[in-house]
């Protein structure tokens, strides 16, 4: 049993969930593109299951191409969903009160517990926490498996193809790093800034982290490129900055970029869809001033503690 508690099997369960969603999508006769939408989620689910079911890389690549065609051809559409009325929602809220948050709070508590007290890791902990939260919610609210899957489908439909962005952008960061983009960036930066001034290199590093995160939507992807190109050769090797502190602050600078980019779909676009906000960039507009203040604070603090 313990052998199943690893990241590959957690991804397998994620893929299985997406395939279940695709099955329910096929049964939604009101969705004008139910079969192509179901195909998209089936293929996406299979990419998660690939290591366990031993799919060759070339086949997964073909899946991604088909998914891109389906998305680009607007063949992935939102289906019909039976949502409870406002009166029903208010009635349930009055009945349960703050106990409604129990399944939600289970997720961070269990994730922290697994990450802190076992060797399974935070990602496996998050997956286990999600499973426990679903079980608790089903028992508390006496919901059926069918209703649970319908709600899963509604959320997947709301997020739509943006759900694929984290994986695609992470892969893009790996490709950039393998292609030597970091070396090119270092050469460009060295040509336009006075590298003999510590503050200038620090500004270049933090600014690079923010800009690349805005472009790729993922600070982790940006970290490999910018740290290789600017952080290590210019800030650490040339000016003796502490690598551990610089890495932490660099990631924070990258997160400032996360706050202001639509490419970070999970944080800035998905909430718009889930909350039915009229302004597509409403979340970003609220976060932008905070991002600017954070970036300036990180630069000041970094200059004080690093040099």
Image: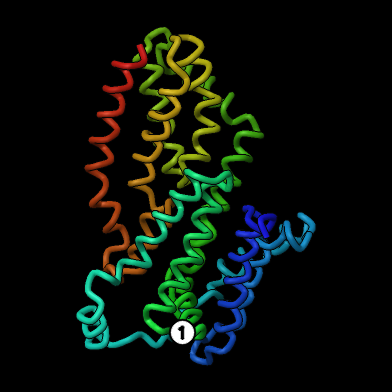
Q: Residue 191, percent across and down?
A: 48, 16
Residue at image location 24% in from the left, 42% down from the top:
290
Vertical side of 13 occupied by 204: above or below = above
Camera-nearest residue between 211 and 125: 125
Vertical side of 43 occupied by 128: above or below = above
Q: Residue 305, percent across and down?
A: 32, 16
Residue bearing mark 1: 147
| Quadrant showing the N terminus | bottom right
Vertical side of 6 occupied by 87: above or below = below
Residue at image location 30% in from the left, 25% down from the top:
299
Which residue ends up furthest to the bottom in the rendered image?
29
Which residue ends up furthest to the top in the rendered image?
196
Residue at image location 50% in from the left, 37% down from the top:
222
How many marks can you see? 1
Q: Residue 112, percent across and down?
A: 43, 49
Q: Residue 153, percent across and down?
A: 49, 77
Camera-nearest residue between 196 and 123: 123
Vertical side of 27 occupied by 280: above or below = above
Q: How is the image coloured?
A: rainbow
Q: Is residue 49 left or right of residue 208?
A: right
| Quadrant showing the C terminus | top left
**Image quadrant of residue 257?**
top left
Q: Is residue 230 left or right of residue 183?
A: left
Residue at image location 55% in from the left, 25% down from the top:
228
């Amino acid at each position: 049993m313990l052998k199943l508690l690893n990241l590959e099997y957690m991804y397998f369960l994620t893929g299985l969930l997406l395939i279940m969603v695709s099955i329910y999508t096929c049964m939604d006769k009101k969705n004008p593109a139910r079969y192509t939408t179901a195909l998209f989620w089936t293929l996406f689910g299979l990419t998660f299951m690939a290591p366990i079911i031993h799919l060759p890389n070339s086949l997964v690549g073909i899946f991604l191409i088909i998914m891109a065609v389906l998305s680009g051809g607007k063949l992935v559409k939102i289906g019909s969903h039976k949502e409870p009325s406002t009166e029903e929602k208010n009635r349930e809220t009055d009945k349960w009160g703050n106990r409604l948050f129990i399944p939600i709070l289970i997720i961070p508590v269990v994730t922290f517990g697994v990450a802190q007290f076992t060797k399974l890791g935070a990602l496996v902990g998050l997956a286990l926490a999600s499973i426990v939260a679903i079980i608790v919610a089903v028992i508390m609210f006496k919901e059926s498996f069918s209703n649970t899957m319908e709600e899963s489908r509604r959320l997947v439909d709301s997020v739509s193809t943006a759900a694929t962005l984290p994986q695609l952008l992470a892969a893009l960061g790996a490709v950039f790093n393998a292609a030597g983009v970091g070396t090119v960036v270092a050469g460009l930066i060295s040509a336009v800034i006075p590298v003999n001034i510590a503050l200038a290199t620090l500004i270049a590093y933090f600014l690079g982290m923010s800009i690349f995160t805005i472009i790729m939507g993922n600070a982790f992807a940006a970290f490999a490129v910018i740290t290789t190109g600017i952080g290590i050769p210019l800030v650490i090797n040339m000016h003796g900055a502490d690598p551990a502190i610089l890495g932490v602050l660099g990631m924070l600078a990258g997160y400032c970029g996360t706050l202001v980019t639509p490419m970070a779909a999970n944080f800035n676009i998905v909430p718009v869809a889930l909350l039915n906000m009229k302004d597509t960039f409403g979340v970003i507009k609220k976060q932008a001033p905070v991002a600017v203040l954070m970036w300036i604070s990180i630069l000041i603090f970094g200059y004080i503690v690093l040099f």
